[in-house]
Image (tube, rainbow, N blue to C red):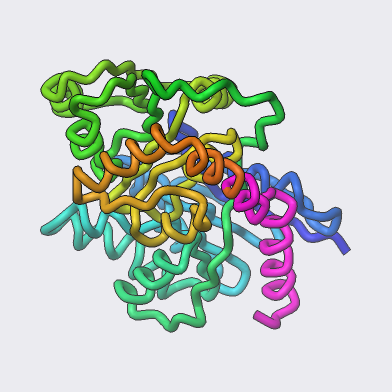
């Protein structure tokens, strides 16, 4: 018997790493599943949310999987055959007042209460879903995301310890660019930042006399080239749901410095330097260690390649396939 799975996704826009991850999952499911894709017609503004709720009409399927970022659309689906994946709840920390109240209802309280099946991409995210929604922990299943970038088979470029290129992926507030800038002050290096930067972020980089370049709207192949051209990758975020750039960097044979917080600790699998993102000196110490200690650096690369095996698309797809089968058989 073949089952029809419909992935329901947000309207496509510039940053689509989650959608790329689920595309990998779909491609690696067995022949027992046929996967289709449907986008909501409107974007992410509040008016778009209302229009999506009023105008979205789902296509027929045996099982629906809302892949994240449009949690509210769960209100249009039956609870017994719909899965909602929640990547993070960062808006609960970023927003306040009436906006936070409304977002919490639309993205956590009402969807989680309505549906039977919720997945999270880390134990940290699961704990937060349970904390803020009040649901039973048994309702939330932790399933991995696959690596989007395949392991690089080309010989790595020699590490430039005299003037390394440090790659920073992402520019949202939680990506911690101001502390990274302060940590790099006085170091001979070049920083490459991927993502739209604010005037304040440009300002703090200039204040710290950094040589830097900024790129955005990069294609998948351009992103691979960014990793390939870098000497090390910095991802010292203050908050993440998973930390996909960590395993992307490891797949590209690059040493990584990331935060000593969950879920970055778990995602990096012991194959990254763990720094305190709130402590400039801790970030600087880690970067200097990677630059100066070749044996340590090579160990990070070696262990990183071992770590990403956990996130190979075929292995992650098996997790989802088993989960889908339990739901469809009524055993979950």
Percent x, y of residue 275: 31, 51
Q: Judge whether residue 106 can be spotted in this image.
A: yes
Q: Indicate whether 181 appears above or below 281.
A: above
Percent x, y of residue 283: 27, 43
Residue 65, by quadrant, is bottom right
Q: Is residue 305 magenta?
A: yes
Q: Residue at x 50, y 57 (%)?
A: 270
Q: Residue at x 59, y 49 (%)?
A: 303
Q: Is residue 283 magenta?
A: no
Look at the image and tell me in which quarter the N terminus lies: bottom right
Q: Residue at x 30, y 41 (%)?
A: 175
Instruction: Give the residues drawn in magenta, as a range.
Output: 304-332
Look at the image and tell me in which quarter the C terminus lies: bottom right
Percent x, y of residue 291: 40, 32
Q: Indicate whether 208 appears above or below 100.
A: above
Q: Judge whether residue 46 can be spotted in this image.
A: no
């Amino acid at each position: 018997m073949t089952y029809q799975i419909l992935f329901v996704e947000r309207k496509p826009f510039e940053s689509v790493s989650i959608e790329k991850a689920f595309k990998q999952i779909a491609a690696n499911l067995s022949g027992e599943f046929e996967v289709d894709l449907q986008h909501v017609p409107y974007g992410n503004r509040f008016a778009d949310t209302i229009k999506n709720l009023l105008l979205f009409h789902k296509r027929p399927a045996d099982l629906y999987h809302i892949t994240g970022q449009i949690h509210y659309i769960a209100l249009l689906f039956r609870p017994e055959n719909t899965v909602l994946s929640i990547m993070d709840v960062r808006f609960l920390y970023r927003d306040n007042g009436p906006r936070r109240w409304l977002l919490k209802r639309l993205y956590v309280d009402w969807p989680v209460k309505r549906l039977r099946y919720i997945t999270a991409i880390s134990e940290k995210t699961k704990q937060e879903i349970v904390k803020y929604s009040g649901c039973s922990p048994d309702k939330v299943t932790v399933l991995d995301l696959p690596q989007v970038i395949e392991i690089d088979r080309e010989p790595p470029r020699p590490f430039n310890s005299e003037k390394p290129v440090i790659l920073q992926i992402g520019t949202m507030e939680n990506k911690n660019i101001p502390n990274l800038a302060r940590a790099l002050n006085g170091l001979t290096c070049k920083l490459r930042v991927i993502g739209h930067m604010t005037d304040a972020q440009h300002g703090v980089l200039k204040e710290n006399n950094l040589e830097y370049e900024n790129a955005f709207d990069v294609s998948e192949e351009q992103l691979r080239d960014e990793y390939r051209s870098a000497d090390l990758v910095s991802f010292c975020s203050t908050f993440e749901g998973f930390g996909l750039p960590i395993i992307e960097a490891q797949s590209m044979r690059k040493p990584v410095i990331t935060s000593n917080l969950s879920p970055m600790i778990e995602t990096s699998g012991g194959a990254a330097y763990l720094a305190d993102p709130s402590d400039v000196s801790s970030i600087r110490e880690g970067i200097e260690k990677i630059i100066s200690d070749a044996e340590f650096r090579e160990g990070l690369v070696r262990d990183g390649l071992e770590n990403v095996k956990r996130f190979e698309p075929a292995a992650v797809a098996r997790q989802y396939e088993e989960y889908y089968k339990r739901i469809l058989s009524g055993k979950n």
